[in-house]
Structure formats: C-alpha cells, structure tokens
Image (tube, rainbow, N blue to C red):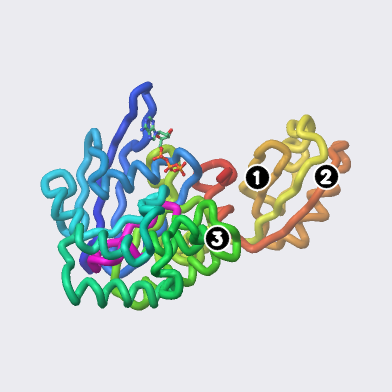
Amino acid sequence: MTSAVTAHELTKSYPGHVTALDGLTLTVRAGEVFGLLGPNGAGKSTTVKILTTLARPDSGSATVAGHDVLRHPARVRRAIGVVAQRSGLDPMASGRDNLTLQGRLFGVRGHALTSRVDELLDRFDLAGAAGRNVRGWSGGMQRRLDVALALVHRPEVLFLDEPTTGLDPEVRTAMWSEIARLAADESMAILLTTHYLDEADRLAARLAIVDGGRIVAEGTPAQLKGELQGDAVHLELERPADEPQARQAIGTVARLREVSFDGRLLSARADDGAAAVPAALAALETAGVGVATVTVARPSLDDVYLRHAGRRFAA
Ligand SMILES: Nc1ncnc2c1ncn2[C@@H]1O[C@H](COP(=O)(O)OP(=O)(O)OP(=O)(O)O)[C@@H](O)[C@H]1O
C-alpha cells in the first residue's frame, strides 16, 4: 500500500535546549485516518509544522503525497489541506468569500470554483449562513468552515491539528461525525493530532502515542488495547502520604500485576478484577491505608498510554 506521509527520525530543538522532536518516525497510509496522540508539549504540532512545510527539522526526512518536504515544499503545499489549531478565517468576510478566496489561492477558477464552494457549503451545513460575515458565526460553524477551507482544492492529505480543542461536547461530537464521513467518502489520508483519547479511539484507523518527541506505541486502537490483558483496577488513596505503605501492602496481593502509582491513584491489572479488589482492600486495610474510591474497567487507551508513557494521560 502506498504511503501518504512518511517521517523518518525527525529531530527538532528550540532555543533554550527544548527538545521538541527526538527521532520521530511514522507512516500514514493512503486513505486512512491516523491519530497522533499525546499530551501538551509532546511534539504533535511541531511534527505537523514540519510535514506541512512551516518548519524545518534539525535532522531526519519526510515525504507527503510522495514529495520530499525539504526539497519540494511547494509541491507538498499544493497536495495538502491544513486545519491549524488557530483558525485561518477572515472574520470580516462571508463564508462564501472565505472559501472562494482560498480556492483562488490554489488556482481553482470559474465554474469549477463556484460549484466546489456550493458543494462544501452544503456538505458542512453552512449554506444558510454563507452570505454572512463569519465573525457572527458560532465556534462550531467556524470550525466546520476551517475544515471546508482546507478541502477546496481537493487535497490528497489532510492535516487536522487538534480540530476539536475548545469546542463544547455537543459541537465536538458533530465534528467527529464530519471527520468520520470525510474519511469514509473520500479516499483521503488524514493525519489528526489530538489530546483526547476518546477522539483517537473513535476516529483513527491507526494511531501513535507520542511522548517527549518520540513515538512510544503504534497500532490500531484495538491492537493497542489488546496488548493489555485483563481488567484495569484503579484505587484512589485517601491520603497521598500513604503511598509507601500502600506500595508495600499491594505488593503482597498476588492477583494484581503491573502496579503503578501516580499521586494518590494506584493502577494495576488483574485477570479477574472483581476477585482482586477485595484482596487489595484487605491488604491496604491491614496496612492502615484508607481508600477513597475503587473502579474496575476494561482496558482503555488511557491504560495503553500509562503503560507506554509510564504515567497517566494529563491532557
Ligand atoms: N516556537 C517555539 N519556541 C520554543 N519552544 C517551542 C516552540 N514551539 C514548541 N516549543 C516547545 O516544543 C515542545 C513540543 O511542542 P509542540 O507544540 O510540538 O507540542 P504539542 O504536542 O503540539 O503540544 P500542544 O498539544 O500543546 O499543542 C514543547 O516543549 C514546546 O514548549
């Protein structure tokens, strides 16, 4: 299968010894939604900036739609659509004018442009508001127009950099449907960055977890979750200061494995969570450790993140 995006051993540092990328390698296949998942500062935006030719790596190489990003940036730019974290809309222009201008910038003209603009306004349910300045539009409508703008010239690869950050839950869910439809209808590769685990789980055919400028895990959401056998057990201690006693006590509970602590939250895995919990509570009680809450759950991407990044997801 052909690759829509390849990044090989990308590194990038910013002044002040900030390592943004530390040897990041990934491949996005044609026609797939690939999720790049990581907390603030993990290196997602830097990766997108390099792949969209807005920044140069210190070392490493990358291709997008078959073009080398360093040698042929203009070709890359023609082949991609980008929805950046900050909106690129002109608030004083109408939705239709924003789309038309964007099309012209990419050399789309005449009837082809008018019909493409109408098609996108319809598709993103923006036709009714098309003549009004976007300044008066809701956040969700503006975000949909951002996505429409990125599609005017029919790009081969679409970059969505945290497309739902700042949207309220209802608008976020609607945006998820738009993205899922887009991926299904067009055979377009989509690279989506997000710090929402549920977003990556829902939209991405494959995803990579990025942490400290490197990919620490990669696969389909099901594969990544499948690596974790059994139930996830989470116990919240009443007092953070009890951690040393809790560690010692929980070490005696044979039914629990992969035990980790993050503040007052103790996480572990168990083949049978329902049987492991009473044993854990008894051991903690004997050690004088109070427990505030207990949960037992099937593995989630959050657990995958904990396993690979060594700490809880703090987006
Ligand atoms: N222009 C810059 N100058 C200095 N440091 C920067 C710059 N841009 C990013 N960084 C730093 O590089 C690291 C990676 O940042 P990046 O924006 O790529 O992460 P991110 O995963 O996209 O985070 P977010 O989810 O907050 O957008 C961070 O430590 C960040 O502070």
**Vertical comparison of 21 with 300: above or below:** above
- For the residues marked 2 and 3, what is the alpha-carbon distance in whole angstroms? 28 Å
Per the model, the C-alpha gap separating discs 3 and 1 is 24 Å
Location of residue 264 in the rendering, given as x and y in whole percent from the top left corner: 73, 39
Q: Earlier in the sequence, mark 2 or mark 3?
A: 3
Residue under label 2, please give it. 291
| 147 in relation to 57, above or below | below
Q: Which residues are magenta?
A: 148-162
Circle 2 packing at 10 Å, graded few (<14), some (14-19), many (20+), is some
For label 3, the SS is: helix
Q: Quadrant of residue 76?
A: bottom left
Picture residue at 66% right of the left edge, 39% below the top: 261
Queried on whether the Cβ of the residue with tag 3 lies below 8 angstroms from ligand 1, the answer reads: no
Q: Say what amino acid the circle numbered 1 marks.
A: Val
Query: Can residue 150 be found in the magenta stretch?
Result: yes
Q: Is residue 28 above or below residue 10?
A: below
Given this view, does label 2 or label 3 mark the residue nearer the observer? 3
288 relative position to 69: left or right: right
Residue that mark 3 sits on: 198
Residue type pointed to by label 3: Asp
Q: Give the quarter of the figure containing the C terminus.
A: top right
Q: Name the secondary structure under disc 2.
A: strand
| Earlier-in-chain disc, 3 versus 1 | 3
Within the magenta stretch, is there residue 120?
no
Residue at point 23% right, 66% down? 153
Look at mark 1 in the image and give the residue it sits on.
259
Q: Residue 136 location in percent, x, y?
A: 49, 58
Residue at point 19%, 75% (across, down): 112
Instruction: Specify whether residue 208 is in view.
Output: no
